[in-house]
Image: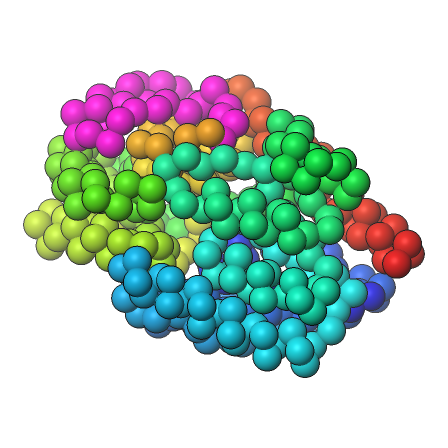
Amino acid sequence: MRIGILTSSRADYGIYLPLLQKMKNDSFFEMEIIAFGTHLSKSHGYTLNDIVKDEYDCIHTISSLISNDDAQSIASSYGLTVLKFVDFWANHKYDLVFCLGDRFEMSASVQAGIPFGVKFAHLHGGETTLGAIDNVYRHQITLASLLHFTATDVFREKVIDLLGSSEGVYYVGSLSLNDIKSFVPIDRVSFFEKFNIPNEEFALVTFHPETMSLQDNVRYAQEMKNALATISKKIFIIITMPNADTQGSVYREVIEELKKEFSDRFLLIENFGKVNYFSAMHYAKILIGNTSSGILEAASFGKYVVNVGDRQKGRVQSDNVLNCEFEATAMVTGAAKAMSFEKYNGKNVYFKEGVVDNIIKIVKEFYESI
């Protein structure tokens, strides 16, 4: 069975990994990686190198991002991605193509495949992020896909409502948590030395723009700066840098200002990679920001999360999530509360046993039916 894997960022590649590793070692599959988006961006860490290191038999690369992140540039990148994938789909045929999540580049690659009859399998459909325009992109991808693998039963029902049919819609759990019970973090001393982290507690921080509130992002970025400057007096802060979203540079500039002003209290990471990021989550005291990792994965590491603003609003949450407004005082208060707690011992609503095995079983049954 010939399988294509669409990956446009460090985030979706990290989520895919358990599935890719299993498929790579299964002779039933002839798997090809289709890398595009920020994987080919030097300003975002050129994470194509991480894919190459994993030694796949075939890696296609498609460059289509414009460097700026204003609305016009994002729309132009979307159009350019569609045009590049028109040529790609015309010359490459697959039995099934995996797509994941809700980024605009992913949506563009899928939309280009519709006239060619490309059969898509979508991971993480049915989710809601009220503070991000990704809702539109995610639902576009859902409508263009034949198979759907959702992270919770609630999301499965949302996909069914969107499609008007339950055919091909499966609740399998979050793919990124497939190996979570067996995950072994990098040795603490080695990890701290590798990234020059001081021997003290730290907060793991990731902020992305609120793409449904473009006029507010300059203010939000300043509120973030003020909050983190205060929080850094109590705890060291490791920041993973924003993705290529609309107005992501607004946050990048402010984060870089923080580093200059408080150089000994902040560490900036462009791209951790999955093992390093999970290790950072394991050793972190708390998480702060508006990234999906705080919603999907942090509970499995026993971490409390200060979830800021509306970007993740609408996603199902475990009991480790503390929500607050995009305002400095609220963030500082939320961080203090989270730091006062011991380890979170509740459940993760996104975890389900055997995610990869279930997906592979369904895909093989699908292949037999076509």
Residue interval drawn in magenta: 315-343
Residue 65's x, y, as percent? 39, 70
Q: Identify whether 59 is placed above or below 333.
A: below
Give the residue displayed 56% in from the left and 72% down from the top.
Answer: 85
Give the residue displayed 21% in from the left and 53% down from the top.
Answer: 250
Q: Identify whether 12 is placed above or below 176.
A: below
Between 129 and 171, the residue placed more toward the observer is 129
Give the residue displayed 28% in from the left and 66% down from the top.
Answer: 68
The reply, left or right, for residue 256 in relation to residue 75 is left
Magenta includes 335?
A: yes
Between 139 and 228, the residue placed more toward the observer is 139
- Mark yes or no: residue 264 visible: no
- Mark yes or no: residue 94 visible: yes
Between 299 and 331, the residue placed more toward the observer is 331
The reply, left or right, for residue 363 in relation to residue 295 is right
Magenta includes 351?
A: no
Quadrant where the image shows the N terminus: bottom right
Toward the left, the furthest residue is: 261
